[in-house]
Amino acid sequence: MPDLPQYEFPVPDQTLTRPGGPVVTSVKTLTALSDIRRDKLLPQLYGRVAIARSNMTEMSHRYGKARPPDWLDAIDDRPDAQIPERCDTATPSEKITLQAAIGAGASLVLLDGRIKEKAKLSFIKSEGAVSILVSAYRHGLLSAVKPMVIALEKLGHADVLPEPDLLDALWEALDRLSEQ
């Protein structure tokens, strides 16, 4: 048998997220859930949720003179925290989210769009808006997911949705789940 070439794959000793750390949200995920009036699912699923201070400032237009929700904590930006090279294409807001999450030792990062998959491939535990809606459904906090997904699309948040074939697979899985 011929000798096969040996490849070395860099595998981190541990993930970049830590059990027991805060849940850190991105502007995109929080905005999408807020636009369909489902941002209140976050404290029901995760308790307190954190957002980078500069991202909170970016969100201030959403709250006007009202205070942000009591369950949403602003945490310090962490420009010194290095994000994985794979995530270099992150938007400035996403980069701030990732740096704050890594710097704070987050247990979970709420992200959407292409950066979510890149973060997962970089050993950063992350979930997006649709995953949050499915989790809420499974915990009995939502009666249906599909109307929420349709609302996200209609309100201009198609960028948080999975590809159509993955959505079809999700509907099938949820149908089987409801039959049980």
Image (spheres, helix red, strand yellow):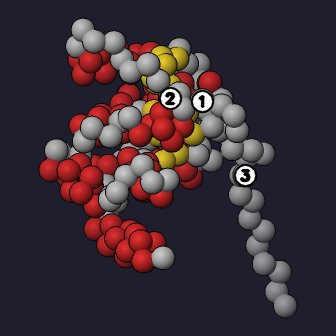
The Cα atoms of the two marked residues, 1 and 3, are separated by 24 Å
The reply to whether discs 2 and 1 touch (Cβ–Cβ < 8 Å) is yes
* Residue under pointer 1: 22
- Disc 1: CA contacts within 10 A as few (<14), some (14-19) or many (>=20): many
Question: What amino acid type should be assigned to the residue bearing mark 3?
Answer: Val
* Residue at position x 15%, y 50% in the image: 154
Left or right of 179? Residue 59 is left
- Residue 58 in which image quadrant: top left
* Residue at position x 49%, y 19% in the image: 73
- Residue 40 in which image quadrant: top left
Residue 156: x and y in percent read 17, 45
- Residue pushed farthest top? 65
* Residue under pointer 3: 11
* Residue under pointer 2: 49
The reply to whether residue 51 is in sight is: yes
Q: Secondary structure at mark 3?
A: loop
* Residue at position x 45%, y 54% in the image: 140
- Residue 14 in which image quadrant: top right
The reply to whether residue 82 is in sight is: no
Question: What amino acid type should be assigned to the residue bearing mark 2?
Answer: Val
- Disc 2: CA contacts within 10 A as few (<14), some (14-19) or many (>=20): many
Left or right of 139? Residue 1 is right
Question: What amino acid type should be assigned to the residue bearing mark 1?
Answer: Pro
* Residue at position x 51%, y 41% in the image: 45
- Along the polypeptide, which appears first: circle 2 or circle 3? 3
The Cα atoms of the two marked residues, 2 and 3, are separated by 29 Å
